[in-house]
Amino acid sequence: MRMYDVITKKRDGEALTKEEIDFFVEEYTKGNIPDYQASALCMAVFFQDMTKEERAHLTMAMVNSGDTIDLSSIEGIKVDKHSTGGVGDTTTLVLAPLVASLDVPVAKMSGRGLGHTGGTIDKLESVAGFHVEIEKDEFIKLVNENKVSVIGQSGNLTPADKKLYGLRDVTATVNSIPLIASSIMSKKIAAGADAIVLDVKTGAGAFMKNEKDSRELAQAMVSIGNEVGRNTMAVISDMNQPLGYAIGNALEVQEAIDTLKGEGPEDLTELCLTLGSQMVVLGNQADSLEEAREKLRENINNGKALEKFRTFLKSQGGDDQVAEDPAKLPQAKYKIELPAQESGYVSGMVADEIGKAAMHLGAGRATKESQIDLAVGLILNKKIGDYVQSGESLVTIHTNNEYVDEVKELLYANIQIQKEKVEKPKLIRDIL
């Protein structure tokens, strides 16, 4: 088989066979196919698309390019959740213990963040003593005992995807639905999930800026999952403004605790109930989404969800007392208010720019080498549709440096206020 022929076939709009896709992925991973030929194939896919069978074959070829995690010794249906990112995305911190409180096993592999705030692991490490460096046997034991555990990502999952993503990043082929969908799904499948729930963001703070593209991506991933034998569902959710009120590591942990107590922001609570209901149904612990939602609400109200969060923290060395006393989380030296410069309704928030403001404080990583300050971040006091008086606080800036003029400028430039009343944006756009 020659790579030249594979490129030609896809350039001309023909579907590639499983053997041709396997050949490309295997030989490119080994270094036997040069970057220029791989780039040509990515560009051909960008323009000619792929059939649902091709997408499934590409996904599984990337899964098989490295290690896979065998979770078969965990009892029950293992349900994983993936979000396509966003600002203030605290859902995993709430969902993992909430869904586990209904005996659905959540065996989660998470990464560190690059961007606005830390990843799930960075956030959890705001809790003193919490660690993710546990052996696989211990991980499986914890999930069987407690129904929940989170570990760091293995170094050799889907090496083909890592290599291909690096190439796509510099050849203007990142934004291709089949390549994005197979990249995301290969990592989820390699991590051993039986069923997958996807939270696909749409809007200014999302990778996909418009709803049409978000829906196309969601449908592609659901199709791949079901094609390769993983029950898969997706929610399309709004990211035209940050989710919840907190942006920052310890601040998001505190918001997750509030949500598990039933005192969290309305939008974060709603998204967690929507995604959690899907996870519970896929995990065979409810017959309908309505029944699942009722059970989740019940476990928030009776304290079982918060108790599961405490068990989860304690089992991985964390100080579970933070659930009752969030002051034990890292605290910033200064809290600086950002007063509204006029009265009116908040009409717009550029979510990714507000995320950058949190990163300037030290809440996220600009590069892989950057150090995160777990205490700092932003608390939004107003969101789209809320009325604000001139001089009233729009945002509370949690910082260890009292000179935050650059952050203030960024926030003012990306929070719009108008005189006319504004509708609050619809959070859940679609369920697939």
Image (cartoon, helix red, strand yellow):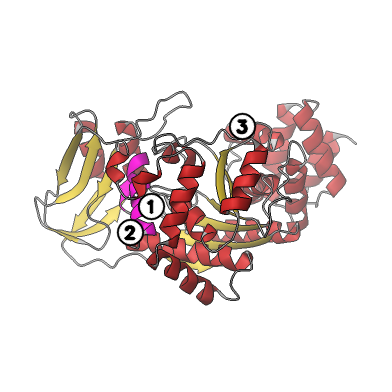
Q: CA distance from mark 1 to mark 2?
A: 7 Å
Of residues 329 and 268, the one nearer the viewer is 329
Examine the structure image and report whether residue 25 is included in the region drawn in magenta. Answer: no
Image point (38%, 30%), residue name:
372
Q: Are marks 1 and 2 in contact (CB under 8 Å)?
A: yes
- Reading the image, the residue beneath label 2 is 264
107 on left or right of 97: right
- Mark 1 belongs to which amino acid? Ala
Secondary element at image label 3:
helix
SS category of the residue bearing label 1: helix
Specify the amino acid type for callout 2. Gly
Answer whether labels 2 and 3 touch (C-beta < 8 Å): no
Q: Is residue 249 visible?
A: yes
Left or right: where 355 falls relative to 279 = left
Which quadrant of the figure has residue 243? bottom left
Q: Sequence order check: which comes first, mark 1 or mark 2?
A: 1
382 left or right of 321 in image = left
Instruction: Point out residue 133 in the picture as x, y percentages from the top left corner.
Output: 56, 33
Q: Residue at x 12, y 48 (%)?
A: 341
Reading the image, the residue beneath label 3 is 166
**Residue 216: image location, x then y, percent:** 59, 59
Magenta stretch holds residue 254: yes
User: Which residue is disc 1 drawn over?
Assistant: 256
Label 1 packing within 10 angstroms: few (<14), some (14-19), many (20+): many
